[in-house]
Image: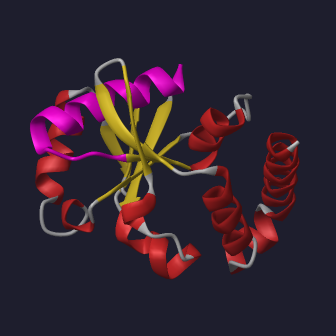
Amino acid sequence: MKYSVFLHIAGKLNQRLQITPLLFGSLGLERRLKMSLNADDVDVLIPKRFIQDDWGALVKLMEEEGYVIVNSEEHEFECDGIHIAFASIENLKPFADIEISNISLLSDSGAAFYLLELSDYLKVYTASSKDGYRKNVKNKQDQKKIDLINNKMREEKV
């Protein structure tokens, strides 16, 4: 369900704002692992100019799709119990040493989007596990994801 919501929003971002989003967080990791992680929300990375300078255009698009802002600081919207949060794709390099230019471009149901490789998710969750808030609140969840990623990467090498 959340993945179809992402595809719908990604298609709108493609068409109306010429944004190719990156499916991030647990939902993106689910796609790479090919297993459910019961993602709480939809995390989407987009160019920072839409978080800063062109925020109004993103808000307008999301409102037209039935979403309301529930946390402006986290750039989070909600509709029918589904939460979508936006962040800057440019933060990947300083946060987890991921080169944006190397991220895989995919297409599904007419929507173009980026998706990290398992090795990139490993970098993200390793970096996240060192973050103060996540270390104290989500450490076990992050470690579980790190273990799943490592296991899947070992399976794929065999």
Q: Residue at x 36, y 40 (%)?
A: 113
Q: Quadrant of the C terminus?
A: top right
Tell me where residue 67 sits by quadrant. Answer: top left
Viewer-proximal residue, 81 or 45?
Answer: 45
Q: Residue at x 42, y 25 (%)?
A: 5
Mostly what secondary structure, the magenta segment?
helix
Give the x, y percent position of residue 6.
Answer: 41, 31
Horizontal side of residue 88 vs 55, given as left or right: right
Above or below, 34 against 69 in this view is above
Viewer-proximal residue, 75 or 156?
Answer: 156
Give the x, y percent position of residue 46.
Answer: 31, 55
Horizontal side of residue 110 vs 115, given as left or right: left
- Read off the magenta span: 1-21
Above or below, 152 against 90 in this view is above
Give the x, y percent position of residue 66.
Answer: 26, 26
Q: Residue at x 11, y 36 (%)?
A: 16
The total of numbered circles placed on residues is: 0
Q: Residue at x 87, y 53 (%)?
A: 147
Horizontal side of residue 116 vs 155, given as left or right: left
| Color theme of the render | secondary structure
Give the x, y percent position of residue 19.
Answer: 21, 47
Tell me where residue 32 sits by quadrant. Answer: top right
Q: Is residue 91 visible?
A: yes
Q: Determine the residue located farthest toward the front in the rendered image.
A: 158
Q: Is residue 80 visible?
A: no
Above or below, 45 against 114 in this view is below
Query: Is residue 22 part of the magenta span, yes or no?
Result: no
